[in-house]
Image: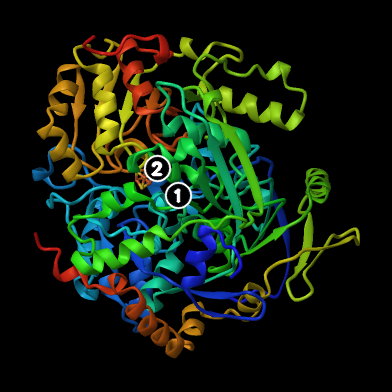
Amino acid sequence: MQAFTILTGTVAPLNRGNVDTDQIIPKQYLKTIHRTGLKEGLFADWRRRADGAQDPEFFINQPCYQQATILLTRENFGCGSSREHAPWALLDYGIRCIVAPSFADIFYNNCFQNGILPVELPGEVIQTLFDRVAHTDQYQVTVDLAQQVVTLPEGEKYSFTLDSFRKDCLLKGLDGIGLTLQHESAITAYEKRRAHEAPWLFQDFSSSVHS
Amino acid sequence: MASKTLFEKIWDQHVVREEPDGTTLLYIDRHLVHEVTSPQAFEGLRLAGRRPRRPTAALAVPDHNVPTTDRSQGIADPMSALQISTLEGNCAEFGITYYGMEDIRQGIVHVIGPEQGLTLPGMTIVCGDSHTSTHGAFGALAFGIGTSEVEHVLATQCLVQKRPKTMEIRVEGTLPDYCSSKDVILAIIGQIGIGGGTGYVVEYTGSVIRSFSMEGRMTLCNMSIEAGARAGLVSPDELTVAYVKNRPLSPKEEVFQQAKSDWLALKTDPGARFDKVIELRGKDISPQVTWGTNPGMVTDVNGHVPDPASIPDEKLRMATERALAYMGLPGGIPICDIRVDRVFIGSCTNSRIEDLRVAARYVKGKHVAQSVKAMVVPGSGLVKRQAEGEGLDRIFREAGFEWREPGCSMCLAMNADVLTPGERCASTSNRNFEGRQGKGGRTHLVSPAMAAAAAVEGHFVDIRDWKMGDQ
Ligand code: SF4
């Protein structure tokens, strides 16, 4: 996983609340067995209007957001399905940070697994950012993970909170599985104890499945 | 000993280690796997040279991509076919039990876990699928995870988690006739909103919940995620134990007896505190119909689609306008005036035997309206066989429904079962997001009874004053 330290980048606006993962990446793109190459599917159904013509308003269709690395959006971003294809598609497009008032749980988790930083900021700050982005071409902000601060070009600074373990993993780009495997002896001890307390949890059903 | 909630009891039993900041290594008892969210996880294992820690704790099944028509022809879409053969190959390589498309036990992953007796009270259960919350109906802590975490569980049988907050949703009294657990969960989501449960594990309590069958409890817990909660729980009781008993893979004899006494102790202690409590009265709940593009956009069947002009809050008004434009509905019209083109009875929310029995009661001796195409997709091969044994397939066929092979089907339309742009569907599934059942398709979420009645009439009807089939 790519580490995240400090990012200065253009902010792309997606002014909708409750954006679900079915919109971030529609199901026709879930048939892949790879995790790369998913940017084609990013917001595929929202790029075009009902008549099939490109929607020039949508951020992906605007030249000034081609290099955007930060997505600005509204509450409960990423609700719905657990598909990790959603952060994969955002990452493939170049997004490394998402700023919103709130996120859905599974999506929030999935971001950290892929080197994307989800930043929660209060609704008023989000509104300020939307206003500024609307009036500035290539509006750029700086996100500093170590300091947990977003700095606007006008100089305002907004701090954000996040879990310390996740922060550490993201700062260092750590492999979560490797970390857990360092505790292998604790896992083995746990399994021994539970197999005694609750033997039905450790019955090997795979030998009895052939009906 | 301090009083604990059901959630706390299960959580505490699964802590492998806990850091001072509360970061917990949580042990996972059961892992369900399907074709869409697993290929990259197995690939990750291969790249890192890792093997699954306990392959026998996992079960895999293809469900999202499978055709629901004649399967002897294989799968027409090469991408879908590849995804399924990849799952089969990965299971063979890593020693994971796999129920293939030709196996009678194949079905939607959240239907077959309980059906096979793999889902047991007190377990931690995960799957790369948000509707894993379904298994909470048994008093198991069950939640959806992403593909990286699928890989994590395969490699370590653990997940790194922070303890979520707890919410009690209590529904007391009795439910009016013609209402089901689907209406209860839709009413709950309507009340707390689609983000209302974010960060919480919900325990459903109260006499209405207790009165539900296991199928009803599964429907309820299934849609916990639609309120933003990763998991829903119902504490196990004698009904739970009876359901689990004698399932093909559930414990037998003395082990079962030992397990049973453990399971029946899985209850929230008197005096235990939840972080939040929500109460609903059973008698206030009516059959529900969603009118918009998320499950929180829902109202009573005898209600109206909201009129944006009467919504003062600008953000809410704009969201409503947008949803109604997508749904092709004028603001303010009665729900019962909405005509449907398609009816879908299926999905991990409502495709179990009880759901099919209820729907069949409504259509028996009647016929699907001329303008409507309707289908029933049983949740598993075993549900299908049982329904056929009870003659339900005949009732549906005679009424003009298509009777299909098991799978996710038009719940997410990854296979050939898709709405065309503009088509309107009464669906027993769980998500009415834009394009969920096909690009431009319009989904209204309802109970099996409401879907069946809509199929016959060609529009939504208040089933409380509607004459069921064969009376
Ligand atoms: S039936 Fe629908 S919600 Fe359930 S697992 Fe399949 S696609 Fe997901």
- Label 1 secondary element: loop
Asked if marks 2 and 1 touch (Cβ < 8 Å), the reply is: yes
Q: On the image, numbered disc 1 is attached to which residue?
A: B234
Residues under labels 2 and 1: Cα distance? 7 Å
Q: Residue at x 19, y 51 (%)?
A: B106
B49 or B338, which is in the foreground?
Answer: B338
Dot 1 surroundings within 10 Å: few (below 14), some, or many (20 or more)? many
Q: Residue at x 31, y 70 (%)?
A: A201
Relative image position of residue B319 (x, y in whole percent): 65, 30
Circles 2 and 1 on the same chain = yes
Q: Which chain does the residue under circle 1 lie in?
A: B
- The relative height of residue B299 versus residue B33 in the rendered view (above or below) is above
- The relative height of residue B260 versus residue B208 in the rendered view (above or below) is below
> In the drawing, what numbered circle is on residue B430?
none
* Residue A138 image-quadrant placement: bottom right
Q: Residue at x 25, y 62 (%)?
A: B87
Q: Residue at x 28, y 11 (%)?
A: B369
Left or right side of B182 for B73: left
**For disc 2, does the CB lie below 8 Å from ligand 1?**
no
Q: On the image, numbered disc 2 is attached to which residue?
A: B217
- Label 2 secondary element: helix
Q: Mark 1 is on which residue type? A: Val
